[in-house]
Amino acid sequence: MATEVDPAGVELRALLEMVDFRNSRILEVGAGDGRLTFRYAEESHSVAGIDTNELEIRSAAMLARAKPRVNARFLCASGASMPFPAEEFDIVLLASSL
């Protein structure tokens, strides 16, 4: 039996109270399958999600391609060595990486 993570939306509400995602360039470290990413991505300018779990990142990338209003890319990478230029993001999330 699958378990729904955060069915009451507490996690997303807490993030939305702290951060304004509108038109921001976001890096999500520990994005996994995009469970949280897709809940805020439509508000943002762009999202790059990274995770070391290749299967989850592939799943997120496939979902992103099916959502035309979401400008999100997903890469298998570590927070210790990211494949991005410095200063590329307005917001960095580490919500699920601890």
Image: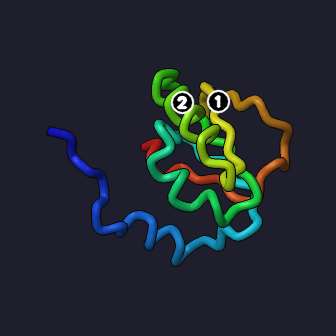
> Crowding at label 2, few (<14), some or many (≥20) Cα neighbours within 10 Å?
many
State the residue in front, 86 or 55.
55
Vertical relation: 78 (above or below) 41: above
State the residue in front, 1 or 90.
1
Please give the name of the residue rendered at 64% of the width and 38% of the height, measured from the top-left corner.
65
- Percent across and percent down for residue 55 are 47, 22
SS for dot 1:
strand
* Residue matched to label 1: 75
Vertical relation: 53 (above or below) 20: above
- Percent across and percent down for residue 19 are 61, 71
Image quadrant where residue 83 sits: top right
Q: Quadrant of the C terminus?
A: top left
Vertical relation: 78 (above or below) 94: above
- Percent across and percent down for residue 20 are 65, 73
* Residue matched to label 2: 57
Q: In which quarter of the image is the N terminus?
A: top left
Q: Are marks 1 and 2 in contact (CB under 8 Å)?
A: yes
Q: Distance between the residues labelled 1 and 2?
A: 6 Å
- Residue at far top of view: 54
- Residue at far bottom of view: 17
Please give the name of the residue rendered at 52% of the width and 41% of the height, measured from the top-left corner.
31
Vertical relation: 77 (above or below) 71: above
Query: Of the residues shown, which amino acid type is indicated by label 2?
Result: Ile
Query: Of the residues shown, which amino acid type is indicated by label 1?
Result: Leu
Image quadrant where residue 85 sits: top right
Please give the name of the residue rendered at 71% of the width and 49% of the height, measured from the top-left corner.
71
| Disc number placed over residue 13 in the picture, else none | none
